[in-house]
Image (cartoon, rainbow, N blue to C red):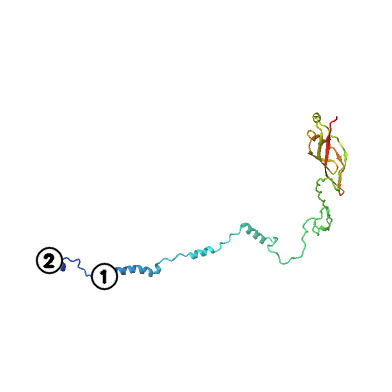
Amino acid sequence: MPREIFGELSNPSVTLGSRARYTVAVSMAAHALACCVLVIVPLVAADVLPSPPQVLAFVARLDAPPPPPPAPAAARASSAQSRSNPATAPAAAPDTIRPGAPDTTDVPGAVPGGLPADLPGVPLGTGLGSLPVVPVEPPPPAPQRPVRPGGHIKAPEKVRHVPPVYPAMAQQARIEGTVVLEATIGTDGRVTGVRVVRSKPLLDQAAMDAVMQWRFTPTLLNGVPVPVLLTVHVTFTLSR
């Protein structure tokens, strides 16, 4: 029994295959060679690889200046007209100035001096230097502000006095007193404005109406009449 068991191990009756053992090594070497060929051949064949994109050439096109816009039709027409018309003024200034006078033979009524013969107020053959000079009137002086008497300015004298009319309502209310006014005397001595400085009920308007009718002598400043501000007092007194 032991011999049968150990005999099968030493001399097996079943075999795995009939190929030789070196075929495995040869197969592995063949596979390794095929892999190397697949990797190395594309690297060696550079002509087959795609070329990189030309990025620099595209950037260089961006740096180029754009083409100039076409000239408008009006400019082309004007340039063509200036070339065709000899009387058109040149675009560039000439190097020298030719002496000569403007031709006025075709202008009716023209004279050699350059002025027309029928110009009113200008005799024939005269220049602009002999034209009549029109005097310019100076502007009117600015209105003077009213001044107050004092110092070398004398107060105006009253030449016309109009007494105030006592209001009936003030008489019935037994109101009396003095109204202080500031009157503006014009250059002709007339009162041009009045304002109340110290009021008295029911008597202010009567006092203003009376002062507006007063007249004064004109006030002179350096020999020139000037308006004056004058303080006046109008007194109302009831009869006893």
**Residue at 12 percent of width and 66 percent of height:** 2
Viewer-side label of 1, 2: 2
Closer to the chain start, of discs 1 and 2, is 2
Location of residue 38 (image quadrant): bottom left
Please indicate, yes or no, whether residue 212 appears anywhere in the rendered image.
Answer: no
Vertical comparison of 50 with 120: above or below: below
Question: Which kind of residue does numbered mark 1 sit on?
Answer: Ala
Question: Which kind of residue does numbered mark 2 sit on?
Answer: Pro
Residue 228, image x and y in percent? 83, 44
Residue tagged by mark 1?
25
**Residue at 24 percent of width and 69 percent of height:** 23
Q: Quadrant of the N terminus?
A: bottom left
Residue tagged by mark 2?
2
Residue 112, image x and y in percent? 81, 60
Vertical comparison of 239 with 157: above or below: above
Secondary structure at badge 1 equals: helix
Left or right side of 8 for 188: right
Residue 117, image x and y in percent? 82, 55
Nearest the camera: 156 or 93? 156
Q: Residue furthest top?
A: 172
Vertical comparison of 95 with 155: above or below: below
